[in-house]
Image (cartoon, rainbow, N blue to C red):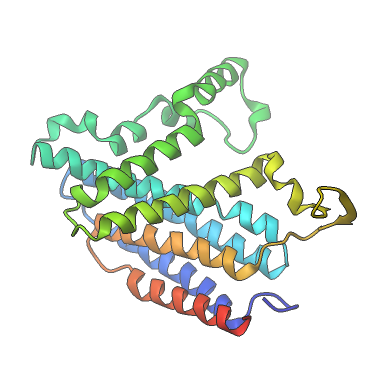
Amino acid sequence: MTAEGLRSEWQALCDEAHDLLTKNIEKLRQYQPTSKVNEYLRDWAIVLSVLSRDIVDSTCILLNAGQLRAANMISRPLADYEILLRYYVVQAMEVEQKSPGDETNIDEVHAATDWNSADFRMGKLLSIYDPSTWRPEFREKLEAIMTSNEKSPERKFAQMVAYLAEKEVGVRKLIDRYIWDAEYRYSNIRANWRMQSAFLHGDQIIITDVIEFDDEGKRTGNINERGSGDARTILFTGLLELSHFLASCEEVHGDSSGQSAFYGKTARAFMASKKTTT
């Protein structure tokens, strides 16, 4: 990162990510599902692609402004969306493999049950951006939904990651060497997601990123106002999640999303930037 913002090669990746998501959204819009399950997967992929584009654009804007902590926090949904869509795709595959062509078991497909949940129907009745307009009964119902243990975002995310780490290789019939790759990747995703969550919620673990302490644990009097992270790592992590998200979209619409080439460009840019700073 330069004093003016992101280096040109990283800004180019930001722009490419935006373009790839835009093209991917159009491919999903044009895609004609061959089953009800595929229709649910397509609709989820559209929703999450649009949101991912918003997050990528916002992350790049914040990094250009030197707002490292805010960029790190706001990029967390890229992991949420990547894991959610990958989970829906793999879990639907598992159901299909148990009873091929049988759509009577659609209630076992989580992409379908989550889409048709009471939460979704309630969302149509509310002004999502202005909770002050909600009637008391809606407030109470939504509070009950969101505070239930099963709806805990942390619980749900951890469960999906654990499922994918255990089952994705077998369900997708990948070769055995991907078992370690999957365990390693999902372990990294979980660890990074927890640290980003710590910033979002003001967890005590992030105190030392703001207040400086010496080796003896005493305050030095210095305050780090901008954050100790670096822009390339924050952006690389987010774009890596995005590339995996695009791969899941390919599973839905069956066409190339440009994911493979984008993944390679992102990895090469990150490795090149590390060499120039070592």
**For residue 105, which quarter of the picture?**
top left
Report the front residue among 34 and 111.
Answer: 111
Residue 231 position, x and y percent, is: 64, 68
User: Which quadrant: the C terminus?
Assistant: bottom right
**For residue 257, which quarter of the picture?**
bottom left
Which residue lies most toward the front here? Answer: 216
Residue 255 position, x and y percent, is: 24, 66
Residue shown at 23% from the left, 31% from the top: 108
Query: Residue 15: in sight, yes or no?
Result: yes
The answer to whether residue 268 is above or below residue 213 is below
User: Which quadrant: the N terminus?
Assistant: bottom right
Residue shown at 35% from the left, 33% from the top: 114
Residue 188 position, x and y percent, is: 46, 54
Residue 53 position, x and y percent, is: 49, 60
Report the front residue among 275 and 39.
Answer: 275
Report the front residue among 72 and 47.
Answer: 72
Residue shown at 71% from the left, 79% from the top: 2
Q: Is residue 100 left or right of residue 58?
A: left
Residue shown at 55% from the left, 45% from the top: 194
